[in-house]
Image (cartoon, rainbow, N blue to C red):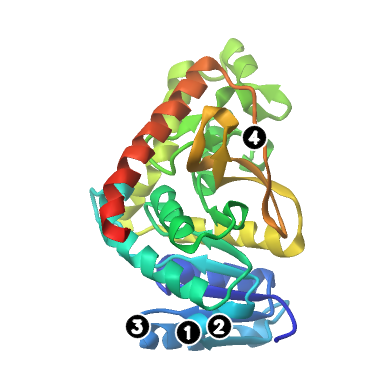
Amino acid sequence: MISGRKIVLIGCGAVGTSFVYSAINQGIAQHYVLIDVNEDVAEGNVIDLSDSHSVLPKPFSSMKVGNYQDCSDADVVVITAGRPQKTGESRLDMIKDNAKIMKEIGLQVKGSGFSGITLIASNPVDILIMVYQKVTGFEPNKVISSGTTLDSSRLRKLLGEKLGVAPKSVKAYLLGEHGDSSVAIWSRSVVMGKTIDEYVEEGKISRAELESVRDEAANLAYEIIELKRATYYGIGACLTRIVDSILEDSKLTLMVGAYLNGEYGQKGIYISVPCVIGSQGIEQVIEWKLEPSELEGIQKSCDKLRQFYNDAKSAFE
């Protein structure tokens, strides 16, 4: 048994390695294991990332290429494996290919004896987290997706730009699918202590502008993919934030994919909602009192995800 926090990354593409790069710069763990179907890619990334060791403010103890048996004593397994999203393709278009990959990963992780927390960012993440939890049988609170952590970060950035304030001063959220049907919860959005309704009443922003901000936040990935073929830095930073809250038992409230058991009128499905994240994974689902239109939007988002999950079943059952 190693001493110190251990993270296993499965999938050494741009998202996975951006996460590890962010994590080592913030010094959140002592040990890192990289797993990829292409061992040369994993090895190259281990060497490249390790080149930073002597200049890091909090150097890690070890980083190596590994296999699924390395999951046995890991604190957190982060999964980013899967084929990438193509230009013009929605996250949901990738379902069947990546469902097969996720089933195989889930069985291998379970076979290692892993008992920690799993964080999934592979797309379409809302479907693949359900595949993973189904095939592993792991406790739902210990299986988390990155959800709308990134989407909500984009919303805060864009809304801050509109109102001329720093994104950190903005409290705004997207719930539901990590994707096109996500729902902006304006009734719970606050900027510098003032509600969005107050800004609208003062003429600082219109309802039409708010809807435009939501659309841009939900669809920004498509613009990035069109320009540079993939998105990875933003999600890498978000994954680090989630993992750090697990390892530090920080009890941060983050917008992650969580299994619902009646909250928001939904049951037996993973969607993004505000959750308290600590050493046991999702330690509490925060249920907000929402406007009827917001709840209707969440219902539509869940209906869409259930349909696509049913379509994916043939690939992993």
State if disc 1 and disc 2 touch (CB < 8 Å): yes
The quarter of the image holding the N terminus is: bottom right
**Label 3 secondary element:** loop
Residue 67's label in the rendered image is: 1
Q: Which residue is mark 4?
A: 171
What is the distance, in whole Å, between disc 2 and disc 4 at their CAs? 38 Å
**Label 1 secondary element:** loop
Answer above or below: position of 196 versus 180: above
What is the distance, in whole Å, between disc 3 and disc 1 at their CAs? 12 Å
Q: Residue drawn 64% across and 15% down?
A: 198
Q: Which residue is mark 2?
A: 70
Q: Which residue is mark 3?
A: 38
Say whether residue 188 is left or right of residue 133: right
Residue type (three-letter) at the residue carrying disc 1: Asn
Answer above or below: position of 57 versus 317: below
Residue type (three-letter) at the residue carrying disc 3: Asn
Question: As drawn, which residue projects farthest toward the left?
Answer: 88
State if disc 1 and disc 3 touch (CB < 8 Å): no
Q: Residue drawn 55% across and 75% down?
A: 8
Residue type (three-letter) at the residue carrying disc 4: Lys
Count neighbours of disc 4 (C-alpha within 10 A) and say few if under 14, some if 14 to 19, many if 20 or more: many
Nearer mark to the viewer, of 2 and 4: 2
In-front residue for pair 66/241? 66
